[in-house]
Image (cartoon, helix red, strand yellow):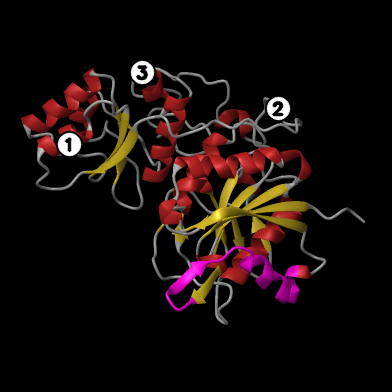
Amino acid sequence: MAARAKILIVYTGGTVGMRKTPSGYRPEPGYLQQLLEQIPRFSDAELPEYVIEEFSPLLDSSDMTPAHWLRIADMIRSNYAAYDGFLVLHGTDTMAFAASALSFMLEDLAKPVILTGSQVPLEQTRNDAQHNLLTSLLILGRHHARLSEVMIYFADRLFRGNRTSKVSVDAFAAFDSPNYPPLGRVGIDIKINWELTLAPRARQPDVEVLEVVELGDATVGAFRLFPGLKPRLLEAVLAPPVQGVVLECFGAGNAPTADPEFMKVIAAATARGVVLVAVTQPVRGSANLSLYATGRALLDAGVVSGFDMTAEAALAKLFYLFEKGFSPERVKRLMQQSLVGELTVPASLGEHDEWGELDGMPWTVADREG
């Protein structure tokens, strides 16, 4: 009989383990462990062995920063050789940001990392926490040898983490992957679509060492365009020492390019080396600046297409690439390439970016496709 897999649960906080108090729900140290010990299913022999390590203090995910992402990554790195997989319990509000960031930070990942949480605390009679935790553990226990990427499991669907966004405040199906199919679906059976998953990176597939890239020093951000935008507001957002900004554009990457002051601000920023990446505001679809005249004007001014990346993934990727020390020009090129499955390059570009070529990395998603 095969040995049971060993899973490390990194409990950061969030709704899943909160306790009701006179002042409202709040996380309490040790309370999640206490609850799990009271629920027989969490001691079932079908589950992998697991150990819980808690953040101190436990956090609402609204308070998460890149420094906390690094704490998660460091907890995974320091325990990497001892466990077969990792389950991160996280608040839902910024879970997609954390999953996107970890997908870039964990550079040599050859084991599965799943983030999950809940909309209703585990202590309540009717909750989604028990299902999300149990199923995440089952997936990690059964499939740890074949899954090797950062994922989100929520409400019967397993997603690539850097393709995921929170789409509902109150539905149990709080997350969606609008531009990439779920990696797995759960009903009577747990079904993984292996054609969609990433294989371990080819550089060090059998080495029990994990490289972690620290995020946080880069000065990057995101800005949502809106009708009536005053160019001076955008100018303030793009002022030094800003290195890069995700522009959440209209439609397929459109903006008020008929406004000469707006375009002047954009051109001045890119001339200074600020990397501007266009993503689309609609939930589904792709920002391709080559499609429309307004998008082409942005392209000519130095903005690059983020294609179908989520805003969360684009922001995390900017953090990552600048932390790697790349020049603005190389960051622009790499923002248009799939490094860890975070985007789909339009078929019209083929093996080229908007400059006519691709800039190779030591690793890309092509190295990981099984």
Checking the image for residue 204, the label placed there is 2
Pick whichever of labels 1 and 2 is earlier in the sequence. Answer: 2
Q: What stretch of residues is rendered in magenta?
A: 21-42
Question: Is disc 1 in contact with disc 2, using a CB cutoff of under 8 Å?
Answer: no
Compared with 67, 219 (above or below) is: above
Question: How many other residues sit within 10 Å of disc 3, few (<14), some (14-19) or many (≥20)?
Answer: few
> On screen, 101 above or below 92?
above
Q: Check residue 320 in the rendering and tell me which mark sits there, or answer none.
A: none
At label 1, the amino acid type is Leu
Dot 1 alpha-carbon crowd within 10 angstroms: few under 14, some 14 to 19, many 20 or more: some
Q: Are marks 1 and 3 in contact (CB under 8 Å)?
A: no
Counting residues from the start of the chain, the first of labels 3 and 2 encountered is 2
Closer to the camera in the image, 31 or 282: 31
> Which residue, given by chain and number where applicable, does mark 1 sit on?
234
Q: Splitting the image into 4 quarters, where does residue 174 fall?
A: bottom left
Q: Position of residue 162 (x, y in %)?
A: 49, 44
Which residue does the numbered mark 3 point to in the structure image? 329
